[in-house]
Image (tube, helix red, strand yellow):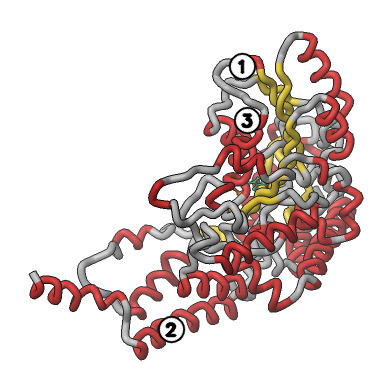
Amino acid sequence: MLDEIKRLENISIRLESDPGKRAKISQDIAQFAESFLQSLQDRKAYVFSKENGAGLADFMPQEEARSTESILSVLDKQLLESGLNPASGGHLGYIPGGGIPAAASGDYLAAITNRYATVFYASPGAVRMENLLIRWMCRMVGYPKNSLGYLSSGGSMANLAAVVAARDAKNITPKNIEHSVIYLTTQAHHCIDKALRIAGLATCIRHFVPMNDHFQMDAAALASLIEKDKKDNLNPWLIIASAGTTDVGAIDPLDSIADIAEANHIWYHVDAAYGGFFLLSDKVKSKMNGISRADSIVMDPHKGLFMPYGSGALLVKNKNDLSRSFYYQANYMQDAIDPNDEISPAEISPELSRHFRGLRLWLPLQLYGIKPFRAGLEEKMLLAQYFYKEIIKFNFETGPEPALSVMIYRFVPEKIKNNTAAVNTFNESLLTSVLEDGRVFISSTTIDGIYWLRLAVLSFRTHLKHIQILLEILREKTSGL
Ligand SMILES: Cc1ncc(COP(=O)(O)O)c(C=O)c1O
């Protein structure tokens, strides 16, 4: 047996290269990353490719090691040469993720040190770091002392946990589910619908609240719906509002909705996955008045804090609302949870072992300070405003003036103006032209049968020149029509 252990050890120790080889691998990878960053200004924001990463199938894990060189060359071709390049400043579609390089250094350290950011006992430093970041966000939204939350993998998972916490706080069970009512608008992100289904709430009644022409929830209509539902012996229990919708960046009237939620004892959730970090700017605070009155809030660092994908956050006003849903004890964890410690993510979230998400946020905030984040967000808002004003000059139709940094627009050629289908097709072809050019990437949406092009300015690398490129392409494709 001892011989076999030795034989296996001789193979398994390859997982830890000797210091010289390890340094060389790190160096090669760092060089690859650096040349990617340096090539960004020449890389397209979108690449059409026939290959689409299919060559990865010839590079399946095999028994023996491959060279770093061959691995990096496959990554270069199969990963970077097709589809959207979210690291590009030209990414103006969907909700751009950022990916500030210092966050990658945080991830690197998180993985190398592999701190267990799940229970305080295992890594007091990691848990404190994450909780302090969460408390910083709680202060940003105006939450009181008893608030807390945790860093999630993104907005969808954070919204799911919020819905579960709301469900348990309002005691929604199979007995009352079918006469319990949720209020939201058709502009709520589809992950909310998904969350409701996953949380076993698909059979709740969903009332879609009418919106004004800025795509904001009509608070008076909400109040009337609730009043009527109560008269009909239904159970209104959850309102889901948005602080920055995905389609148009609309912010619902959060304060008026809070009045209604409070008066009717309804759980009030605000999805601020996209819009939340704009609160760093004083210019936005008044637009989000009332957000502090929500029972739960989602805000995504991988949107408004320019983090790489994999960074969301759920905040709740009363931390007991998370413990109610997510606290568990297990015999094998008996040494790990002490009620006198700092609260651990394991006690208030669905996960146990998890990525140490805090370090990728903490490091860039320390290295650069908050100032450039705020400036970046204010710059993005102004870029969206600038685009809005310019595109009108080119005779484009627009949706509402951007409240943050997302807006919709479309071109209606004179000759086909009465033919909605033809106008839709024309705008689809505009989008294709922008993608074929590739310097910038845009996406689209359909609202009430109308196809709209979208502008979403949120990458920290997006600057005036990217907006000007888009304007130039759109003007060229529509002039004289
Ligand atoms: C308003 C809003 N909520 C939720 C989400 C989902 O977030 P994630 O993609 O991080 O799961 C998005 C994504 O764009 C969003 O814009």
Could you tell whether 2 is left or right of 213 in the image?
A: left
Residue type at mark 2? Asp
The answer to whether residue 247 is above or below residue 178 is below
Location of residue 161 by image quarter:
top right
Q: Label 3: few (<14), some or many (≥20) within 10 Å?
A: many
Work out whether mark 2 precedes mark 1 in sequence or the reverse, and give the earlier one.
2
| One can see residue 452 in this view | no
Q: Which residue is mark 2?
A: 28
Q: Position of residue 472 (x, y in %)?
A: 77, 62
Could you tell whether 114 is left or right of 383 in the image?
A: left
What residue is shown at x 38% (from left), y 70% (from top)?
74
Work out whether mark 3 precedes mark 1 in sequence or the reverse, and give the earlier one.
3
Residue type at mark 1? Asn
Q: Residue furthest bottom?
A: 20
Q: Label 2: few (<14), some or many (≥20) within 10 Å?
A: some
Q: Label 1: few (<14), some or many (≥20) within 10 Å?
A: few
Q: Which residue is mark 3?
A: 167
Task: Give the CA distance from mark 2 to mark 1.
Answer: 59 Å
What residue is shown at x 83% (from left), y 16% (from top)?
227
Element type at marker 3? helix
Element type at marker 2? helix
Of the pair 143 and 201, the residue shown nearer to us: 143
**Numbered tag placed on residue 207 in the rendering:** none
Q: Which residue is mark 1?
A: 176
Image quarter in which the N terminus is found: bottom left
Q: Position of residue 256 (x, y in %)?
A: 89, 34
Task: Give the CA distance from mark 3 to mark 1.
Answer: 11 Å
Q: Nearer the observer, disc 2 or disc 3?
A: 3
Of the pair 422 and 381, the residue shown nearer to us: 381
Q: Position of residue 224 (x, y in %)?
A: 85, 19
